[in-house]
Image (spheres, helix red, strand yellow):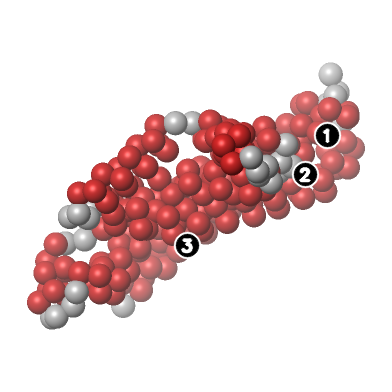
């Protein structure tokens, strides 16, 4: 079996377009996931039991079910209930955001709880409300500590976003499938797809490591 390098070269532009779509989906999903996760993470440590219970149900359900099933629920089940078709792009972003939010919630919960309790007590003794203390004292410190796990979540979702190909969304994996359907050259295309994913994940890993080092340097100053 010969390796068709010309096919790899000719297919690369199409695969790079798919990679761009993958990055876009991941970036938007993680951004929305951070917003969801921040509020849910705070709700997880709330003293108000109903809020804490609802947050726990959300986190447990999402973390306990596969992303693929969640994509199907958003893309197929919701239209069956509402009677309105959902665009694949909206379904992909929605499912990935909700999924990411549950994992980010646990990251923020752990980060917030890692801050010394004396910080909150000191802030409250200065006249700050609980919300002000969280906003200005606790969360900024916790955010620095959760950068590495947030980076890991970005990488995990980058790879898991390949699952949106099942609803026909043309990200990197789906582009590879379409090219293979025309050329019947699985080895060349899947190897190219794997290498592109590898480059993206390594780049993100290096960037997260840089941010972590930068924040540690700022703390020393």
Look at mark 3 in the image and give the residue it sits on: 210
Residue 196 visible, this angle: no
For marks 2 and 3, the one nearer the N-term is 2
- Label 1, label 2: how far apart the Cα atoms are: 9 Å
Of labels 1 and 3, the one closer to you: 1
Where 141 falls versus 183 (above or below)? below
- Label 2, label 3: how far apart the Cα atoms are: 28 Å
Q: Residue furthest top?
A: 1
Instruction: Name the image quarter holding residue 61.
Output: top left
- Horizontal arrangement in the rendering, residue 5 relative to residue 221 (left or right): right
Residue at screen point 35% across, 37% down: 60
- Horizontal arrangement in the rendering, residue 216 relative to residue 209 (left or right): left
Residue 179, which numbered label?
Answer: 1
x and y percentages locating residue 11 in the rendered image: 84, 41
Residue at screen point 64% across, 40% down: 83
Q: Residues within 10 Å of mark 3 (few under 14, many from 20)?
A: few
Marks 2 and 3 close (CB-CB < 8 Å): no
Q: Residues within 10 Å of mark 2 (few under 14, many from 20)?
A: many
- Horizontal arrangement in the rendering, residue 7 relative to residue 79 (left or right): right
Total numbered circles: 3
- Label 1, label 3: how far apart the Cα atoms are: 36 Å
Residue at screen point 73% across, 31% down: 190
Where 196 falls versus 219 (above or below)? above
Look at mark 2 in the image and give the residue it sits on: 15
Q: Residues within 10 Å of mark 1 (few under 14, many from 20)?
A: some
For marks 1 and 2, the one nearer the N-term is 2
């Amino acid at each position: 079996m010969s390796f068709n390098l010309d096919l790899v070269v000719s297919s690369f532009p199409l695969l790079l377009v798919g990679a761009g779509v993958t990055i876009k989906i991941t970036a938007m999903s993680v951004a929305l996931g951070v917003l969801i996760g921040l509020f849910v993470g705070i709700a997880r440590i709330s003293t108000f039991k109903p809020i804490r219970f609802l947050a726990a149900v959300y986190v447990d359900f999402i973390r306990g079910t596969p992303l693929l099933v969640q994509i199907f629920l958003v893309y197929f089940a919701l239209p069956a209930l509402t009677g309105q078709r959902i665009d694949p792009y909206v379904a992909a972003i929605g499912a990935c955001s909700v999924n990411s939010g549950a994992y980010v919630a646990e990251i923020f919960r752990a980060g917030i709880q890692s801050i010394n309790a004396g910080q909150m007590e000191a802030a409250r003794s200065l006249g700050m409300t609980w919300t002000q203390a969280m906003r200005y004292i606790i969360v900024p410190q916790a955010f620095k500590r959760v950068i590495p796990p947030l980076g890991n979540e970005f990488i995990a979702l980058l790879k898991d976003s390949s699952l949106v190909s099942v609803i026909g969304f043309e990200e990197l994996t789906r582009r590879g499938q379409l090219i293979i359907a025309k050329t019947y050259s699985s080895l060349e295309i899947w190897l190219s797809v794997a290498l592109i994913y590898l480059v993206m994940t390594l780049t993100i890993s290096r960037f997260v490591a840089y941010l972590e080092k930068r924040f540690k340097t700022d703390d020393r100053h």
